[in-house]
């Protein structure tokens, strides 16, 4: 059991990005295509954070060409290179799943001043 804990603690990132639910973030993801590697950006609103420790994840939602796209990113994944906070959001919920049903300006989150 101790070996599992040490393996888990080794794979944890030292510097965690500081962001909350409702923030608009830009996530840098390492994409592998055959032998080549490149970094792809995914920008959207954080609608959920789940788990703790190695299994901690966050869900980012954006609307691309009128279609809602959600991606779940593990916080401690080596493929997640960087998370930049673009703007802070003012929310009163832990999960923003209600944004899935909203269209247009109603799907926006107010900015925290």
Image: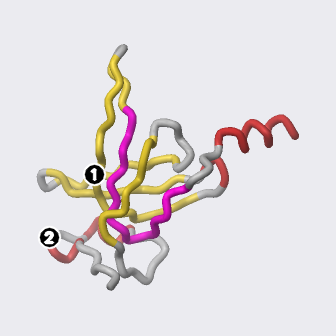
**Along the line of sight, the residue nearer the viewer: 5 or 10:** 10
Quadrant assignment, res 47:
bottom left
Give the residue at the far right of this rendering: 2
Secondary structure, mark 1, is strand
Give the residue at the far front of this rendering: 15
User: Which color scheme did the rendering employ for the protein?
Assistant: secondary structure
Question: Where is the C terminus found, in terms of image quarters?
Answer: bottom left
User: Which callout, 1 or 2, points at the residue further toward the start of the chain?
Assistant: 1
Using a 10 Å C-alpha cutoff, classify the residue at mark 1 as few (fewer than 14 neighbours), some (14 to 19) or many (20 or more): few
Quadrant assignment, res 97:
bottom left
Q: Residue at x 39, y 34 (%)?
A: 30
Question: Residue 4 got which mark?
Answer: none
**Along the line of sight, the residue nearer the viewer: 20 or 100:** 20
Residue range in magenta is: 16-30
Question: Residue 104 got which mark?
Answer: 2
User: Eyeballing the image, is 102 above or below 91?
Assistant: above
* Residue 4 in the image, given as x and y percentages of width and height: 79, 37
Q: Residue at x 45, y 79 (%)?
A: 93
Using a 10 Å C-alpha cutoff, classify the residue at mark 2 as few (fewer than 14 neighbours), some (14 to 19) or many (20 or more): few
Question: Where is the N terminus found, in terms of image quarters?
Answer: top right
* Residue 11 in the image, given as x and y percentages of width and height: 65, 39
In the picture, measured across the screen, residue 52 lies left or right of residue 104, that is: right
Q: Is residue 29 magenta?
A: yes
Q: Residue at x 35, y 73 (%)?
A: 88
User: Eyeballing the image, is 63 above or below 106?
Assistant: above
Q: Are marks 1 and 2 in contact (CB under 8 Å)?
A: no
Secondary structure, mark 2, is helix
* Residue 96 in the image, given as x and y percentages of width and height: 39, 71
Disc 1 target residue: 69
* Residue 81 in the image, given as x and y percentages of width and height: 44, 42
Q: Is residue 22 magenta?
A: yes
Cα–Cα span, label 1 and label 2: 14 Å
């Amino acid at each position: 059991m101790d070996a599992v804990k040490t393996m888990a603690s080794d794979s944890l990132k030292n510097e965690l990005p500081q962001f909350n639910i409702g923030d608009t973030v830009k996530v840098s993801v390492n994409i592998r295509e055959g032998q080549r590697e490149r970094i792809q950006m995914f920008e959207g609103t954080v609608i959920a954070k789940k788990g703790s420790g190695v299994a901690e994840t966050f869900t980012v939602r954006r609307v691309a060409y009128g279609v809602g796209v959600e991606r779940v990113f593990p916080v401690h994944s080596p493929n997640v290179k960087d998370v930049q906070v673009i703007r802070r959001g003012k929310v009163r919920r832990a999960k923003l799943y209600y944004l899935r049903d909203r269209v247009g300006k109603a799907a926006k989150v107010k900015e925290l001043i």
